[in-house]
Image (cartoon, rainbow, N blue to C red):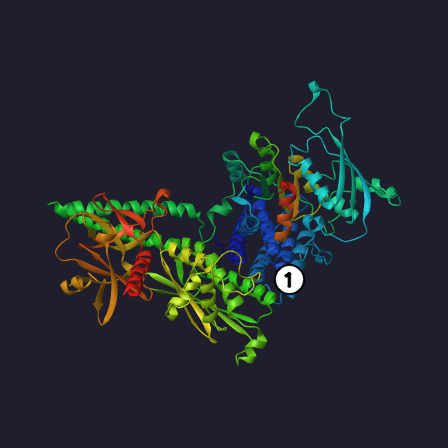
């Protein structure tokens, strides 16, 4: 079955790139524009992977990750966050919030697909 | 589904971000310590930097990075927000606009001056040290480090690892890690159950196992470490080479920080913004003139407008028979307004074909490299606007057609020179609007379609008989038959399972038509005629027996009476003579097996698709009718004669005739009759 991926980013261009990349790799992609929107979509449906930005208006990525870990349907779902910084602090914070892995911006489409394959196992 | 060009989306987005940043900065000049404004400006700069770097605006990203850093420091309370800082960022923000508009321009001197100004505002002194920009060209990504296979000698590794207890809850799948290791080479995995607690104490959501793995691989140690890249920090990992010499290095791997393999860039610390940003009005209030609306909302609105048009036509009908003059004038007013509303709605859904064409630059560039052919792509009429759905659905067919032109049409440079042409081949993509249709053409100046090969291929696959005479156009149309392909070898450009038949079907599903023209040695041209909009059409309402049917008005050429002469002659062959040419006709009464007695004066509606014409014989022509198309249910998706249905003013249903199918049926009937006699 096609894996369902939710991408959460306030930047339309990043959302577009992410969606096109993942859709071309054969995944079903749903988009959300910020943490709140993402959480709404996570409450409404089930996803196999969440790819989220951290820095967003209305609700940031860390809060969203913490909240989504409380949802029974998404306790164990892989969550990849996008970050422009490559230092350990933000990664440690995101890991503590419940993130599975990360991808450093700018990323090329291939890296995103590799990461998705890695954490989804397909 | 097609997608707009990410770079143009980014430009729009960046322009909006810059406006937000500007308005946030201007607000800050009034109240310097407004936390929400500071956060909003920081976020805007942060997004601009991140997206800019994604889409190749490296200078913009690097420059923005410094402003972001400055604001980050303000946000964290390291430095105060001052008027000097705000105005330094304001002038920097104007410069960002320039970097966005002319990314390749020479901006270095101004960039340096502005940054100096910025650093002076932050620290009270200019700082040359900050010039080391971490963003530009920083492509060290986690994934880049994940799999860079480097061939080496086969080595055997002993790996022992255990994961943090909560790893599964955080989305790490231990099985996935084991699978990844299996991909590296020959792998023997033994689970260590020593730490599994008693049943009473066991939490099934936690991980209690450790694993011992013997792995034979030619990959370097870093590839094994990369399997665990996301959990490296919290896990126990021991990697030792079985053969011995590398064993002492193993513990170091376990303690290496997760980011170590790929983190080379200068690091900017960043704390998270406050948990929930209550007010981000800077974004909403003063955003740009562009409002982004999800496509589904537009579709929803289109449906409502469609229903309104139906209700309005019922009102018009009722008012027409009522004596109340007031009612009539209101009804006319509503008719006018709903017409205008419909037109406005149509315009909202229109997108320039530029968004469709822009993707071909890259495609042509890539194909040019793959095939070794020199290709120039020329696009014309990019501002022509078409319904969004049309754009979405046409993307794949167009890609196929362009690929075809390049793969089959254009010759290699040496062949072209030998044929007396310029070495560089041309592919022209153009769009223009005529009436209610948009015509998209893909033209190349290549070798043209090889008729003999088409013929041979068609005979080989049984599409035509060896002795069957075919007109040139009929021969060319063969390439639209399912399973037809003249490529001698299936190259990796064409022959991807999408054939011209799929292209044709897609175009027909959009109620469009496809035509092909080709001159040997000079090139080929494929033209798609697509109606501008899909949801509402102008139709000609006709009656056949007791049923009403709608013929799309754009396909109607003319209406005439079926003369007795033509009627009688048609007993043998169904033709009418129309200004010296014979047009085959179909009797819809026969086609629909209508039982009632025919009207004494039968009418003919002549419809056409491109070059082909067919007459449809009906009982009565009622008049033109604005038709809101409702698609047929899945149960009826294989009904070929009708393309949809519509609701008439009195609430009854009329089916919409599928013009393409009927013309083909009429031509087929003609061909059969010709063959018979």
Instruction: From the image, tell me which residue sits under label 1.
Output: B111
Q: Position of residue B96 (x, y in %)?
A: 58, 59
How many badges with numbers are in the image?
A: 1
Left/right of residue B235 with respect to residue B41 in the rendered view: right
Look at the picture and state if B394 lies above or below B425: above
Look at the picture and state if B669 lies above or below B163: below
Left/right of residue B245 with respect to residue B519 in the rendered view: right
Q: Secondary structure at mark 1?
A: helix
Q: Position of residue B236 (x, y in %)?
A: 77, 35
Could one spot residue B104 in this view of the protein?
no
Q: Position of residue B477 (x, y in %)?
A: 40, 64
Question: Counting other residues with Cα less than 10 Å from the Cα at mark 1, is it few (<14), some (14-19), or many (20 or more)?
Answer: some
In the displayed image of the protein, which residue is found farthest to the left?
B323
In the displayed image of the protein, which residue is found farthest to the right?
B245
Left/right of residue B130 with respect to residue B441 in the rendered view: right
B440 or B352: nearer the eye? B440
Look at the picture and state if B465 lies above or below B37: below
Could one spot residue B222 in this view of the protein?
yes
In the displayed image of the protein, which residue is found farthest to the top?
B200
Look at the picture and state if B192 lies above or below B452: above
Chain of the residue on which disc 1 is drawn? B
Q: Quadrant of the C terminus of chain B?
A: bottom left
Q: Position of residue B516 (x, y in %)?
A: 41, 67
Left/right of residue B111 with respect to residue B483 in the rendered view: right
User: Which corner quadrant of the image does residue B350 belong to?
Assistant: bottom left
A27 or B140: nearer the eye? A27
Task: State the residue at coordinates (44%, 61%).
Answer: B462
């Amino acid at each position: 079955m096609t894996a369902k991926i939710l991408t959460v980013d306030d930047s339309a261009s990043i959302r577009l790139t992410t969606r096109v990349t993942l859709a071309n790799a054969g995944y079903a992609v749903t988009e959300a524009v910020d943490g709140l929107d993402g959480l709404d979509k996570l409450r409404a449906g089930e996803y196999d992977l969440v790819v989220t930005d951290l820095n967003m208006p209305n609700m940031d990525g860390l809060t969203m990750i913490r909240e989504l870990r409380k949802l029974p349907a998404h306790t164990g779902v892989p969550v990849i966050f996008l970050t422009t910084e490559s230092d350990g602090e933000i990664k440690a914070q995101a890991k503590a919030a419940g993130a599975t892995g990360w991808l450093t911006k700018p990323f090329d489409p291939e890296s995103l697909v590799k990461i998705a394959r890695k954490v989804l196992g397909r | 589904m097609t997608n707009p060009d990410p770079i143009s989306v980014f430009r729009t987005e960046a322009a909006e971000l810059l406006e937000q940043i500007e308005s946030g900065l201007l607000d800050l000049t009034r109240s310097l310590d407004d936390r929400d404004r500071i956060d909003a400006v920081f976020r805007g700069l942060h997004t601009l930097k991140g997206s800019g770097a994604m889409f190749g605006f490296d200078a913009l990203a690097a420059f923005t990075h410094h402003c972001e850093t400055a604001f980050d420091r303000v946000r964290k309370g390291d430095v105060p927000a001052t008027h000097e800082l705000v105005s330094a960022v304001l002038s920097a923000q104007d410069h960002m606009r320039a970097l966005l508009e002319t990314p390749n321009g020479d901006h270095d001197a101004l960039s340096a001056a502005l940054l100096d100004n910025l650093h002076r505002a932050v620290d009270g002194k200019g700082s040359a040290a900050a010039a080391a920009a971490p963003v530009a060209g920083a492509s060290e990504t986690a994934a880049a480090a994940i799999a860079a296979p480097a061939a080496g000698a086969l080595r055997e590794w002993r790996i022992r690892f255990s994961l943090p207890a909560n790893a599964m809850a955080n989305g790490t799948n231990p099985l996935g890690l084991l699978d990844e290791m299996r991909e590296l080479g020959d792998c023997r995995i033994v689970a260590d159950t020593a730490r599994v607690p008693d049943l009473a104490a066991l939490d099934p959501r936690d991980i209690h196992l450790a694993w011992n793995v013997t792995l034979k691989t030619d990959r370097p140690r870093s590839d094994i470490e990369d399997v665990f890249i996301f959990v490296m920090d919290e896990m126990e990992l021991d990697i030792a080479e079985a053969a011995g010499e590398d064993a002492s290095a193993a513990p170091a791997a376990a303690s290496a920080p997760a980011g170590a393999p790929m983190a080379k860039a200068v690091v900017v610390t960043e704390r998270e913004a406050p948990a929930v940003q209550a007010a981000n009005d800077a974004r909403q209030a003063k955003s740009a003139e562009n409002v982004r609306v999800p496509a589904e909302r537009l579709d929803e609105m289109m449906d409502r407008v469609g229903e309104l048009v139906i209700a309005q036509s019922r009102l018009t009908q009722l008012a027409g028979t009522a004596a109340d003059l007031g009612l009539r004038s209101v009804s006319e007013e509503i008719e006018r307004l709903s017409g205008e509303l419909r037109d406005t709605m149509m315009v909202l859904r229109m997108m320039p074909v530029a968004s469709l064409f822009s993707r071909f630059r890259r495609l042509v560039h890539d194909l040019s490299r793959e095939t070794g052919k020199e290709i120039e792509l020329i696009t014309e009429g990019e501002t022509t606007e078409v319904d969004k759905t049309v754009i979405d659905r046409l993307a794949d067919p167009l890609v196929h057609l362009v690929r075809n032109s390049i793969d089959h049409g254009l010759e290699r440079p040496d062949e072209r020179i030998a044929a007396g042409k310029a070495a560089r081949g041309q592919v022209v993509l153009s769009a223009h609007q005529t009436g209610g249709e948009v015509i998209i053409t893909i033209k190349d100046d290549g070798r043209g379609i090889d008729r003999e090969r088409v013929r041979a291929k068609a005979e080989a696959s049984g599409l035509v008989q060896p002795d069957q005479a075919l007109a040139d156009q009929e021969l060319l149309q063969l390439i639209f038959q399912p399973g037809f392909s003249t490529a001698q070898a299936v190259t990796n450009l064409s022959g991807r399972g999408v054939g011209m038949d799929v292209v044709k079907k897609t175009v027909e599903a959009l109620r469009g038509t496809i035509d092909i023209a080709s001159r040997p040695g000079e090139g080929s041209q494929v033209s798609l005629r697509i109606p501008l909009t899909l949801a509402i059409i102008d139709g000609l309402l006709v009656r056949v027996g007791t049923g009403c049917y709608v013929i799309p008005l754009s396909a109607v050429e003319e209406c005439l009476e079926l003369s007795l002469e033509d009627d009688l002659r048609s007993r043998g062959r169904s033709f009418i003579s129309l200004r010296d040419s014979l047009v085959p006709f179909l009797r819809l009464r026969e086609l629909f097996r209508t039982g009632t007695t025919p009207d004494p004066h039968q009418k003919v509606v002549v419809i056409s698709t491109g070059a082909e014409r067919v007459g449809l014989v009906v009982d009565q022509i009622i008049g033109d009718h604005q038709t809101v198309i409702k698609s047929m249910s899945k149960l009826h998706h294989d009904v070929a004669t009708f393309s949809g249905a519509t609701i008439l003013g009195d609430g009854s249903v009329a089916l919409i005739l599928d013009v393409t199918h009927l013309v083909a049926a009429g031509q087929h009937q003609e061909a059969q009759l010709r063959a018979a006699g």
